[in-house]
Image (cartoon, grey):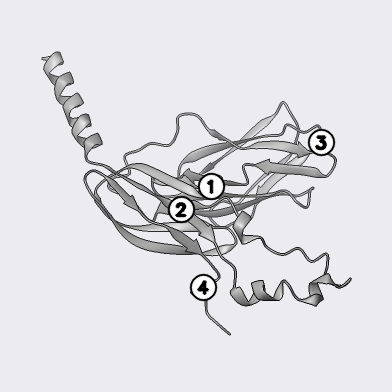
Amino acid sequence: MKTILTVLLLATAARTSAQAGTLLGTVQAQGKTEAQDESGSGAYASRKYKFAERVNYADMRDFVVYIKGPVGTNAALPPSKPVIVSTTRILQEGATFTPHVLPILAGTTVEWPNNDQIFHNVFSVSEPKQFDLLLYKAPVVKSVTFDKAGRVDVFCSIHANMHCVVLVLENPYFATADDHNHYSISNVPPGTYQLTAWHERMPPQVKEITVPATGDVKADFVLGITNLPKY
């Protein structure tokens, strides 16, 4: 009887796995063309503006693509081990959070080890998760569980350039684009979804996509400063 039950469970799992598609594509950013045209003007060569750093949209990274809202029963559980956000020192110029953007499933615990020989104070005032880990050094490792979906901006109260974003999502179907701006989300159940491309500096872009029982769905995104109220 136990053998028959095992076979039935394996067959059910195989059918579930077979009925899933893959989302893939590219995501990139694009600035306003009028501003790009101005970059070659004489004003940027002047003493007043030559140190004004312009946004390089071609070099933008840390894009996240995810399915918006709950999917099915959201049976997938958070990782059994906490996702680790490491803190590393950048020479004598200060400290930084690595990675800069971390997408996670709601309910995930994130550890915040301090690998520097100086104090850090990790905190956030974002509505989805407000916290203050106070001052600490190694070997102390503190952690936070993010149980509500939304964007959480995290800072250090001591160091001006320490900032990262924890993007807490409602389902496990998300991906961070790679260094070539490609993304892939596998094992997506069949259905129609709102697929969202996100970057911390841009309005998100949403496309409605339909995932078949098997096969790939391609969706490319170009993010820009669009679809905002104009004044």
Q: Residue furthest bottom?
A: 231
Please give the name of the residue rendered at 73% of the width and 31% of the height, measured from the top-left corner. 115
80 vs 56, nearest the viewer: 56
Question: Label 1 sits on what residue type?
Answer: His
Q: Residues within 10 Å of mark 3 (few under 14, many from 20)?
A: few
Looking at the rendered structure, the secondary structure element under dot 2 is: strand
Looking at the rendered structure, the secondary structure element under dot 4 is: loop
Looking at the rendered structure, the secondary structure element under dot 3 is: loop
Instruction: List the residue tagged with mark 2.
Output: 26
In the rendered image of this protein, does residue 56 appear above or below residue 124?
A: below
Question: Label 3 sits on what residue type?
Answer: Ile
Labelled pair 2, 4 in contact (Cβ < 8 Å): no
Labelled pair 3, 1 in contact (Cβ < 8 Å): no
Instruction: List the residue tagged with mark 1.
Output: 180
Tell me residue 18's x, y (percent): 22, 36
Labelled pair 2, 1 in contact (Cβ < 8 Å): yes
Q: Which of marks 2 and 3 precedes in the sequence?
A: 2
Residue 89, numbered circle:
none
Instruction: List the residue tagged with mark 4.
Output: 226
23 vs 8, nearest the viewer: 23
Q: Which of marks 4 and 2 precedes in the sequence?
A: 2
Q: Residues within 10 Å of mark 1 (few under 14, many from 20)?
A: few
Instruction: List the residue tagged with mark 3.
Output: 118
What is the quadrant of the N terminus in the image? top left
Please give the name of the residue rendered at 83% of the width and 71% of the height, measured from the top-left corner. 45
The span from disc 3 to disc 2 (Cα, nearest Å) is: 39 Å
